[in-house]
């Protein structure tokens, strides 16, 4: 059986030996045997664990990766794979939201309302009905300064325009995913300032990031499968 010194593993993965010790202290790789002089003796299995860790971190993050590898150590491969599957499903939903957001920004006719004639001035009830959003949610988004409806100078009632309808539809789409929360205000406010191109740019950048994470996740899954092969789980 081939044995590796910590420096051998560190050089292969282009990381420090202290990083290896950190990973070991997290309990996500098996504890290595020690030589007579006390040095760690890593095996091909340890190398596969470390490779998997490094490959999964970018696409899945540290907590998920560590959770997956702890299950692998207990030969709970199916549990580990379903955790990975769930994360990929979440990323798929991120892409769906990004695609829907771009569609809302690119089509001035709002295809989901194509059979509806939008008036220049609408009440909050009409806005809620058109967008299938609760009035309380619209008032909350106003409080959060995501939207700023006009006010009737005579009675103080809120007045919504087609621009506000687009904003509400965007917020309704974007709030489905945690990923977009940090970009939501910028996208919605760009619409208010008629900067549709800026809103599209932010969304397209987010979509590119989603594509990158998808590639990273598949690279991580590949190394996870390789680890399971090394452990004779597959």
Image: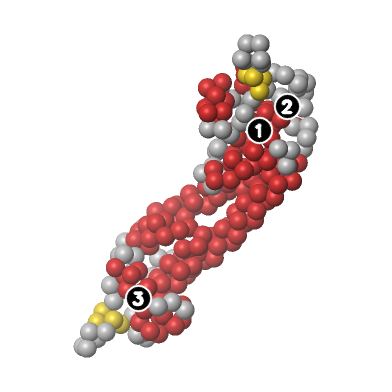
Residue 6 vs 31, above or below: the answer is below
Which numbered dot is residue 43? none
N-terminal of the pair, mark 2 or mark 1, is: 2
Instruction: Name the residue that disc number 3 marks.
Output: 18
Residue at point 61% right, 15% down? 156
The reply to whether the C-beta atoms of the residues labelled 2 and 3 are less than 8 Å apart is no
Query: Mark 2: few, some, or many residues within 10 Å (few <14, many ≥20)?
Result: some
Q: Tell me the distance, in whole angstroms, between the alpha carbons under discs 3 and 1.
A: 49 Å
Which numbered dot is residue 167? 1
Left or right of 36 on screen, residue 59: right
Nearer to me, 25 or 83: 25
Residue at point 40% right, 78% down? 16
Instruction: Name the residue that disc number 2 marks.
Output: 162
Residue at point 73% right, 27% down? 162
Nearer to me, 3 or 76: 3
Residue 174 lies, in percent from the top left, at 59, 39
């Amino acid at each position: 059986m081939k044995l590796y010194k910590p420096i051998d593993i560190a050089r292969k993965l282009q990381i420090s030996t202290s990083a290896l010790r950190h990973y070991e202290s997290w309990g996500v790789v098996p504890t290595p045997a020690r030589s007579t002089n006390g040095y760690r003796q890593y095996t091909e299995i340890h190398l596969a664990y470390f490779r998997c860790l490094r490959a999964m971190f970018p696409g899945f993050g540290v907590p998920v990766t560590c959770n997956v590898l702890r299950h692998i150590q207990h030969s709970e491969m199916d549990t580990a794979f379903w955790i990975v599957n769930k994360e990929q499903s979440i990323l798929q939903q991120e892409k769906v939201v990004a695609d829907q957001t771009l569609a809302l920004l690119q089509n001035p006719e709002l295809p989901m309302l194509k059979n509806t004639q939008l008036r220049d001035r609408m009440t909050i009830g009409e806005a809620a009905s058109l967008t299938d959003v609760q009035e309380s949610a619209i008032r909350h988004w106003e409080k959060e300064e995501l939207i700023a409806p006009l006010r009737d100078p005579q009675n103080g009632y809120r007045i919504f325009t087609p621009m506000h309808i687009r904003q509400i539809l965007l917020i309704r789409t974007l709030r489905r995913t945690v990923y977009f929360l940090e970009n939501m205000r910028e996208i919605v406010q760009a619409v208010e300032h008629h900067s549709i191109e800026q809103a599209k740019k932010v969304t397209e950048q987010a979509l590119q990031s989603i594509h990158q994470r998808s590639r990273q996740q598949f690279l991580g899954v590949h190394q996870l499968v390789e680890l399971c092969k090394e452990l004779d789980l597959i």
